[in-house]
Image: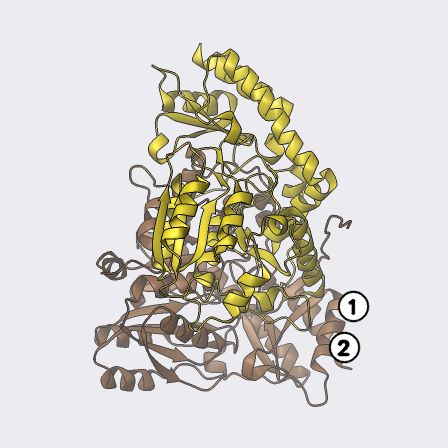
Chain colours: A brown, B yellow
Amino acid sequence: MSITSFYPPQRTLMGPGPSDVYPNVLQALSRPTIGHLDPTFIKMMDEVKELLQYAFQTKNPCTMAVSAPGSAGMETCFVNLIEPGDKVIVCINGVFGGRMAENVTRSGGVLVKVEDEWGQPVDPAKLEAALKSHPDAKIVAFVHAETSTGVLSDAKTLCALARQYGCLSIVDAVTSLGGVPLYVDDWGIDAIYSGTQKCLSCVPGISPVSFSPAAVAKINSRSVPVQSWFLDQTLVMSYWSGEGKRSYHHTAPVNTLYALHESLVQLQTEGLENAWARHAQQHLALRAGLEKMGIEFIVDEACRLPQLNTVVIPDGVDDAAVRNHLLQTYNLEIGAGLGAFSGKAWRIGLMGYAARAENVALCLRALEETLN
Amino acid sequence: MSITSFYPPQRTLMGPGPSDVYPNVLQALSRPTIGHLDPTFIKMMDEVKELLQYAFQTKNPCTMAVSAPGSAGMETCFVNLIEPGDKVIVCINGVFGGRMAENVTRSGGVLVKVEDEWGQPVDPAKLEAALKSHPDAKIVAFVHAETSTGVLSDAKTLCALARQYGCLSIVDAVTSLGGVPLYVDDWGIDAIYSGTQKCLSCVPGISPVSFSPAAVAKINSRSVPVQSWFLDQTLVMSYWSGEGKRSYHHTAPVNTLYALHESLVQLQTEGLENAWARHAQQHLALRAGLEKMGIEFIVDEACRLPQLNTVVIPDGVDDAAVRNHLLQTYNLEIGAGLGAFSGKAWRIGLMGYAARAENVALCLRALEETLN
């Protein structure tokens, strides 16, 4: 056996994530590792918390990064908030809603599904009907920006309904954070998780989460321990807490947290509203170019994600061959369809650092040359 | 709010981990991010698997890195192998054995504890007595190298006992992998997990694991799903499998895997036996210097970890003040005592890249100057 060092190609990442990483984030990533209990590192963790509060638009003290990818952020929300027998309404309109449902049953919850078609947003009327039929429901969960379909759901309305019927809300913001408006406190979101490798343009591997005081109260009043030791927020909170002495829980992913810190400094410097506007603007540029080529969007404009453009693969076009050609010839990655959209759609991401005029130009030109 | 970029100090890490990271591993970490489904990346994942098989000395096809820290590697082994009601014998001689016990109960297992004193290795006679008293036990779990005490247990004998009594074995090799001899196949280990931030001198955040064919068979014949979706090996295996089409599970921590790949290339280049010998040699140098200063080891020489030296804090010495002085004056981190050893012991790590003559010299000189 003789395996040598790995040198990845320089790609342009315009799929559903990971997205192009900011150069200064990669620099931050490779700074010298220090101990996770080093006072300097603890101060940095406090800054990460404060920067995440800004990104999420929340004052929740329980805001931090789970030391594992977005899927683990999802699981953190479900295993902490669900006690065995709790009824949970999950709105499903794509892959990630389905994954939420899987989390409910594995956490010992009683699952109630509210389903919408792929490519459609979650229908608030259906949620309200379910809430009326299940007055004993305790939690409502849905995906804000469905990465599998490119659809934005109305998180504000859905959370207001949950609250109106006495439920806590769990929101998947993996693809929405930093790309479209999101106001955790104003919208009354109780538990939210995201990823770093989408609109934050950080490397993948950790998952920002935030819990409202009501969610924390439910966690603290559990009668049975959280089934996961690693994701147990009652323990993790003591590790991330700024007050008094921190309790050792696990070893934080030190360098990945440097990277998250840097990407959040970048977001703070640009300003949330400016970042949202940039995603919207580049989406319009991409849309104009695609429409000129006769390529159609799957999702209605009203609920279309600017950062993840799901388009119909034109008739007679070989899906895999086109994506492979883009990768081999232009070092450009766009995303395949997932689940029900497999082979039928492409997902073109304009996330974070990838939402730039030069990326849109490259993508349009490369697609045009490949399809003609 | 105005938070600026974070520039960590350059420390020398001689605590219980994270250890000093190889400079070329930090370089690998910051190479351009590519998609986790990119063919180039998939090939690299295959290489990581092969390199881990070498590090673990195993042919297990089910060898990979869990996308989260060692604590999640531990949880992966327990939640996959335990079905509700399974009786599990856990040998406890420090913090991490206690954490294993916690994992058993949270996974729905029936816990049998075999306890040894802190600073002592696991006693095979006690394990055999427990196996005789509990003929219905299905799993034996223990820590190979206890990070909280610096003790090495006899994994070969303990695994042989487990097998003799019809049990599968789960072994914590977080601190042992790459630092002391470890032969997964020869010793008949069924499930093993490790960390990257100890003797591999990689950044923290992911956890190498390996499962024997017998362990995989138990996982595949489960009657209830694994309680964790994120850690469910039946799903993760399809993501890491080299055969045929891979199934999307989660987004791998792309850059951290570059770093692990590089640290494993480093280990392959040095050679496992040479790495073990280097740790032993630097331990002897450190020991000689400490003994000259009258500092005593807590652990008997026969079961002392070369890579983690637990020593008695001399009478009248202020634990925190000394560690703080070392950090502030010499940028040198050594570890505090944990649990029962809190305030009574220091843990001096010689792990991976930190097991070098210059580190030993710095540590001895700095300690001498600080204590006098």
x then y, percent, for residue B232? 49, 65
**Secondary structure under the numbered disc 2 in the rendered image:** helix
Amino acid type of the residue tagged 1 in the rendering = Thr
Residue at 62% of width from left, 52% of height from top? B185
Q: Marks 2 and 1: CB-CB under 8 Å?
A: yes
- Which chain is mark 2 on? A
Q: What residue type is labelled 2?
A: Thr
**Does the rendering let one see residue A178?**
no
Q: Is residue B367 above or below residue A253?
A: above
Q: Residues within 10 Å of mark 1 (few under 14, many from 20)?
A: few
Q: In which quarter of the image is residue A194?
A: bottom left
The residue carrying mark 1 is A329
- Please tell me which residue lies in front, A227 or B60: B60
Query: Residue at the location (37% across, 68% down)?
Result: A171
Quadrant into which the C terminus of chain A falls: bottom right
Residue that label 2 marks:
A370
What's the chain of the residue with tag 1? Answer: A
User: Can residue A109 be seen from the camera position used here?
Assistant: yes
Secondary structure at badge 1 equals helix
